[in-house]
Image: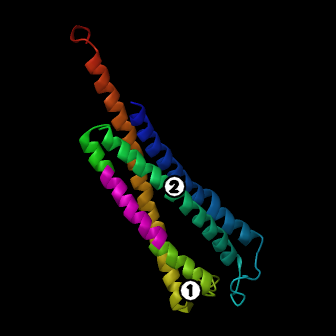
Amino acid sequence: MIQDSLGRLFILLAAGIWLGGFIMLGYGVAPVNFGIAESWQLDGVNPSLPEQHVNYRTIGGALTGDSIARLNQIESLCLTFIVLGLAFAWRNQTGSRKNRIIRTFLITTIVILFYYYVVSVGGRLMEIRDTVPIDFGVTDDAMKSALHLEFDRLHKTYTRTASVVMMLLAALFALTIFDGTGNRIRILKKTVPADQS
């Protein structure tokens, strides 16, 4: 019974923190970084790429990019706890078999997408950002370099993939909660004598 609760706790806590991190990044970090950088008309010199033209978009992007790197570390930890929680569910046969199979499918998909958007897409984004002096003040696609266009494309891919993971995490959260409720009802029914039910 303790391991059942612990497994659920791992999944619910990790999925909740992960979802909260996404929401905070989208609502409380990125728009704040870009908004303040624009309102203060920030510019300066990029110490890693002194030849880069720097404006508020460059600074806001750098701040947000570093925040995303920190979030990725939290996501990795959350993913570990989710997998542990699923292992507990299978070991203890927690919930219905169908529910465990669906959650296994969801978690497997989350693992694949996480690797894709963090390692593959995110790694390439960081490589471009750290090695290519892109002028992020240029907004006309016709005037952007090939690497700038690649950066924009990868950024959209990252955002869309992370959004899919958010939906999968929300589904995982709901399935974990409602499967636990069903189990408690079934256990109570079994313990109540037939003449009292």
Residue span colored magenta = 104-119
Residues tagged 2 and 1 counted as in contact (Cβ below 8 A):
no
Judged left or right of residue 19, residue 133 is right
Specify the amino acid type for callout 2: Leu
**Image coordinates for residue 46, horizontal then vertical, percent:** 72, 82
Report the mark closest to the observer, 2 or 1. Answer: 2
Judged left or right of residue 122, residue 57 is right
Specify the amino acid type for callout 1: Asp
Q: Residue at x 56, y 83 (%)?
A: 128
Check if residue 109 falls in the magenta segment: yes
Prevailing SS of the magenta stretch? helix
Q: Nearer the viewer, residue 167 or 86?
A: 86
Residue 193 versus residue 80 in the image, above or below: above
Judged left or right of residue 186, residue 48 is right
Numbered tag placed on residue 77 in the rendering: 2
Residue that extends furthest to the top in the rendered view of this protein: 195
Q: Residues within 10 Å of mark 1 (few under 14, many from 20)?
A: few
Location of residue 47 by image quarter: bottom right
